[in-house]
Image (cartoon, rainbow, N blue to C red):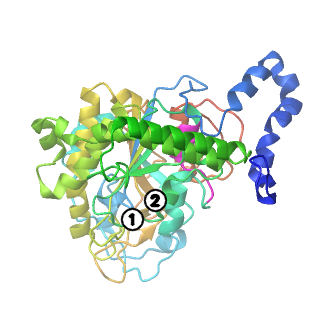
Amino acid sequence: MSPTHRTNTDRQQHRRDFFGSMRDGLLGVGLTTLLGSDLPRVVAADHRPASDLTPRPPHFGGQAKSVIQFFMTGGPSQVDLFDPKPALAKHEGELPQGFIDNVESVGSAGGLLPSPFRFARHGHSGLPVSDILPHLATCVDDISVVRSMWTTSFNHETGVMMMHSGRPIKASPSLGAWVTYGLGSENRNLPAYVALDDPLHKPILLGKQNWQSGFLPPIFQGTRLRSIGSPLVNLQPRQPLPPAILDFTRGLANRMAHEHQLRRPGRPELAARIASYELAARMQLTATDAMDLSQETAATHRQYGLDQKVTESYGRRCLLARRLVERGVRNVQIYMNTANGDNPWDHHGDVQGNLSRSCLQTDQPVAALIKDLKQRSLLDSTLLVWGGEFGPCRWPEGGKPGRDHGANGFSVWMAGGGSRAARFMEQPTNSAITPWKTVSVFTISTPRCSTALAWTIAAWFSTTTVSTSGSAASSRPAWSERS
């Protein structure tokens, strides 16, 4: 067969590629009068190869350069961690009519359940924090707690998709993919977008859908790295080879891959695959170095809890996140799993015992990362986001001392990266029955607060800013702020 011969399969053009090839023409038709002489520059900036991760300046002046997301799958309990509700004790065991009218589902609710934990105010800000987070309590002057989050579903899968992409559908790009697409990568030898999973390799809810690129080119999806041993399976050859042979093999493979791509135009997945192979070759040295925690001091190991069995696993991932951000990785997600692979923050049966264990595993490492980034002058340029897909309800499930799912009034917190420290943001209420919902914050088309959070984070990077009407906006979130 002739090298230039193409089969019908080769000539087929995907729908996505067809519209992609029309992009510049549509821009020229619709924007000529609006942009005038700026049009060539805009088109040139937008028309870049699908595998291009060259760092790009933001559209507006932004402070955040990297983001680290602590994703707590299962729904951490806000009324037991960051949002005290004293009225729960007053109405313990009751099922008020206002409660029935305003919750998603009462199911087998046995009445309101007060928190078994004590709250105290900490720092100059006086933010209240539960006594099962003693380490984070020392960092309250560096964090902002959003106590009025809400979403449209109290099912885990839909909630996870909403918090990762702002959309309840599986084809949407994740937040990390958008950030990488907008700003590129500052280190060509490491992935721009990294997901750190549990060292035991227990399943993560929805798996790779959490860091997918959706309809963006595949190069912008996240890379799942292992926190123990080789970061990627088969990253190193099984048997050591002389450098000359390795260089020849890589060069030959690259030439063959590019020739294959030239015979199949309009296939962005091929460019992404080639870029992935080239990145893997460069990672053979840089990734191993970045993930070598033996380079850290014994004091740093103790600070992150690597000397204790209960905190070693999560502490290792938090320390790796700092090392990756130091080396220019744009987006890092840290996941947590239990020994059974369940949702570790989903505490239906025993909120007191199970929530205490989850906090014990994560509290010291998370606080250590905040302090370490601050000491290294990295906190101002690194946005930290802590939270789950929703929160629990204020009542027990089936008479057990746990909490069922709840979509309204849950909490997340942010630190660094231009966020306002020592604040909690909410629609003010002390009600234990009807939580308020934040709605007017950077949504795309529907006022879901989980959508709002994703786009608020993107706004801190100044990659995009979207208001509820879909028009450009430059204002900050319309939360009520209380110090």
Point 86% across, 32% down: residue: 30
Question: Depth check: 425 or 335 in front?
Answer: 335
Residue at screen point 32% across, 51% down = 82
Q: Is 16 positioned to the left or the right of 55 in the image? A: right
Q: Position of residue 8 (x, y in %)?
A: 81, 59
What's the residue type where badge 2 is placed? Answer: Glu
Most common secondary structure along the magenta stretch: helix
State the residue in front, 416 or 99: 416
- Quadrant in which the C terminus appears: top left
* Mark 2–mark 1 CB contact (< 8 Å): yes
Q: Is residue 440 above or below residue 210?
A: above
Residue 455, image x, y percentages: 57, 42
Does the image show residue 15? yes
Q: Is residue 120 left or right of residue 402?
A: left
Tell me residue 231's x, y (percent): 34, 49
**Disc number for residue 389:** 2
Residue sitting farthest toward the top: 37
Q: Which residues are magenta?
A: 171-181
Look at the image and say whether residue 335 sits in the magenta stretch. Answer: no
Residue type, mark 1 in image? Gly
The residue closer to the viewer here, 275 or 145, is 275
Quarter holding residue 321: top left
Which residue is pictured at 79% across the width and 41% down the height? 21
On the picture, is 350 further left or further right than 32?
A: left
Residue receiving disc 1: 74
Q: Quadrant of the N terminus?
A: bottom right
